[in-house]
């Protein structure tokens, strides 16, 4: 199957030098892919480069057969690429309903927005139960459910999730990963960045290890979970060392 | 007691105008993280334009409000595009103080050349009309000014809470990156938001010219008053600005009528200092970017 997303030798950064130093990555449609790696490896930068918050200095980002490099974040949204940033991305002093409406901000057809919100509320009933409450008054897990519901308003093909489980208790974390799996079951593609590598890989079809701005290894989530080197570096205690020198430069194929 | 209640009435009637001016100030801060030191100058410029429309064409200042408001909205958008947008985002909060102060001086210079530096006032036929209710005097101009300010604040509320643009403004205030990721064009919202803040200054300025005599340097007094109101209410909160306006306006009017007008100006600074000692973020300010 042709990949829905292809990053080809992508270099990008914030001005003082590149953080991504030639990222190669392919994401299959309808799958969940988890990016893991140490702090500062460039995981969030990968997502920002795909959603358009950052532009690559070199290389290309392809969505299907369309190059994204020159497109604005808004144009990428309209193509169906939604980015949920790290930490809380809701508007805390707006109602849950207004947050959902903001999910359809770029859609001119008001009726279509209402229909999509109705669908999102079916998938995430918490949105109906707490519709009039300020989003900031919800628990961390509930806010994450609303964030995911809001992405559905855009009817996305590709959902980029940055640290979706950060700050959540174990129960809420499980709920979030269940929701991510159900998004994939609906045919959406999910690329997530996750510091909690074990949970992230367990919920993913594929995993990629990013280190020092380069993808070192790509494999199925299950294989990465069982890889002793990955387990030693990323699934146990925090560690900043580089991967084993014998790891394939561009990983095994998916 | 009579003097106290008379002061309270006067303060409440004036509070609406102050709230209108300050709501624009706090809106601009909320959207752009910019403290607009030119807000007072924009109010005085609007007062002068109303004065000129009244003098040259006999247009009543209340009726002139739509014209002045639209004009100042356009000027506000132009100021944002020309002078504030080029500032780097990370330096904007600090540099905008210098830039908006320079804009205030520019406006003051234009007003001094155009209308000279002596005091002006708008003397309509009803300027001195008043009603007496239970022995308390209610000036007609202040009553209408208050009603009009409340209507303008109501429209601002509807705009911010019931429209797509308003949702985009509130979203940008609360979480700019997230708003951008949902397709909100933050530069466009900032330009329109600055225009909107300037438009509130225009509506308030037209009314201000009816209530007080003014000259080009009046904006210095006004901006210190506006900043006090905004800081008292909490930077970025329109509700806070309204409460701040009521506190500042009524306290100074009550002190003026019961003790002495000489102590009036000092009163709200004392209240401001006390509030900031007890609650450094102001009455309705929060550590996070919150509701406007």
Image (tube, coloured by chain):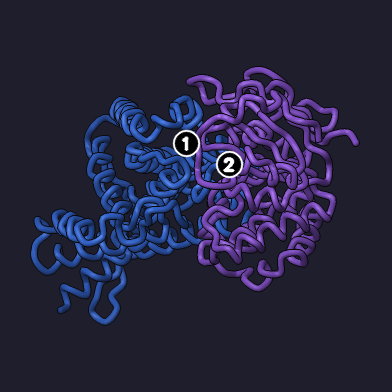
Chain colours: A purple, B blue
* B83 with respect to A86 (left or right): left
Find residue A66 and report its horizontal and vertical position in percent. 82, 28
- Residue A243, numbered circle: none
| Label number found at residue A232 | 2
Where residue B50 appears, as percent x and y from the top left, is 40, 43
Q: Name the quadrant of the N terminus of chain B.
A: bottom left
Q: Is residue B233 above or below residue B185?
A: below
> Which residue is tagged 1?
B76
Where disc 2 sits, the SS reads helix
Where, by quadrant of the figure, is residue B261 drawn?
bottom left
Q: Are marks 1 and 2 in contact (CB under 8 Å)?
A: no
- Chain identifier of the residue bearing label 2 in the image: A
Residue A101 lies left or right of residue B140; in this view the side is: right
Q: Chain of mark 1?
A: B
x 28%, y 56%: residue: B232
Relative to the observer, which residue lies in front, B88 or A1? A1
Q: Nearer the viewer, residue A29 or B122?
A: A29
C-alpha gap between disc 1 and disc 2: 59 Å
Residue drawn at x 66%, y 21% as measured from the top left: A22
Which SS class for mark 1?
helix
Give residue B10's position: percent from left, percent from top.
Answer: 26, 66
> Which residue is found at the position 71% from the left and 69% from the top?
A125
- State the image coordinates of residue A47 (x, y, percent, origin top left): 64, 37
């Amino acid at each position: 199957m042709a990949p829905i997303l292809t990053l080809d030798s992508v270099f990008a950064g914030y001005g003082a030098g590149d953080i991504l130093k030639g990222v190669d990555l392919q994401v299959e449609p309808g799958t969940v892919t988890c990016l893991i790696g140490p702090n500062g490896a460039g995981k969030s930068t990968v997502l920002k480069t795909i959603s358009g918050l950052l532009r690559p200095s070199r290389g290309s980002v392809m969505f299907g057969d369309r190059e994204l490099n020159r497109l604005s974040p808004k144009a990428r949204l309209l193509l169906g690429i939604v980015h949920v940033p790290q930490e809380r991305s809701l508007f805390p002093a707006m109602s849950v309903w207004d947050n959902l409406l903001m999910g359809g901000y770029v859609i001119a057809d008001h009726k279509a927005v209402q229909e999509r919100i109705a669908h999102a509320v079916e998938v995430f009933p918490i949105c109906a139960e707490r519709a009039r409450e300020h989003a900031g008054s919800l628990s961390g897990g509930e806010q994450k459910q609303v964030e995911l519901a809001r992405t559905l308003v855009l009817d996305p093909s590709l959902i980029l999730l940055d640290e979706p489980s950060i700050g959540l208790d174990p129960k809420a974390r499980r709920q979030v990963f269940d929701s991510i799996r159900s998004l994939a079951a609906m045919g959406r593609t999910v690329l997530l960045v996750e510091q909690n590598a074990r949970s992230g890989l367990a919920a993913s079809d594929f995993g990629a290890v990013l280190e020092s701005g380069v993808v070192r290894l790509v494999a199925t989530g299950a294989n990465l979970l069982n890889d002793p080197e990955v387990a030693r570096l990323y699934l146990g205690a925090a560690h900043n060392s580089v991967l084993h020198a014998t790891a394939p430069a561009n990983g095994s194929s998916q | 007691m009579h003097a106290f209640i008379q002061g309270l009435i006067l303060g409440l009637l004036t509070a609406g105008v102050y709230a209108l001016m300050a709501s624009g100030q706090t809106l601009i801060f909320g959207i752009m993280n910019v403290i607009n030191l030119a807000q007072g100058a924009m109010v005085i410029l609007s007062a002068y334009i109303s004065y000129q429309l009244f003098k040259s064409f006999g247009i009543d200042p209340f009726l002139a409000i739509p014209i002045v408001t639209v004009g100042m909205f356009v000027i506000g958008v132009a100021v944002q595009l020309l002078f504030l947008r080029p500032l780097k985002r990370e330096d904007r909060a600090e540099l905008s103080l210098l830039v908006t102060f320079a804009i205030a001086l520019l406006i003051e210079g234009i007003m001094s050349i155009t209308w000279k530096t002596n005091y002006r006032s708008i003397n309509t036929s009803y300027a001195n009309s008043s009603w007496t209710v239970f022995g308390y005097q209610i000036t007609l101009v202040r009553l209408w000014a208050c009603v009009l300010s409340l209507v303008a604040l109501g429209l601002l509320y509807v705009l911010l809470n019931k429209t797509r643009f308003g949702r985009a403004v509130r979203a940008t205030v609360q979480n700019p990156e997230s708003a951008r990721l949902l397709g909100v064009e933050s530069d466009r919202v900032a330009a329109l938001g600055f225009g909107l803040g300037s438009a509130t200054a225009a509506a308030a300025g037209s009314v201000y010219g009816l209530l007080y005599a003014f000259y080009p340097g009046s904006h210095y007094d006004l901006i210190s008053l506006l900043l006090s109101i905004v800081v008292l209410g909490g930077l970025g909160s329109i509700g806070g600005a309204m409460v701040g306006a009521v506190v500042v306006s009524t306290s100074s009017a009550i002190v003026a009528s019961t003790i002495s007008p000489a102590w009036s100006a000092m009163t709200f600074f004392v209240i401001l200092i006390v509030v900031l000692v007890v609650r450094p973020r102001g009455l309705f300010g929060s550590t996070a970017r919150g509701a406007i």
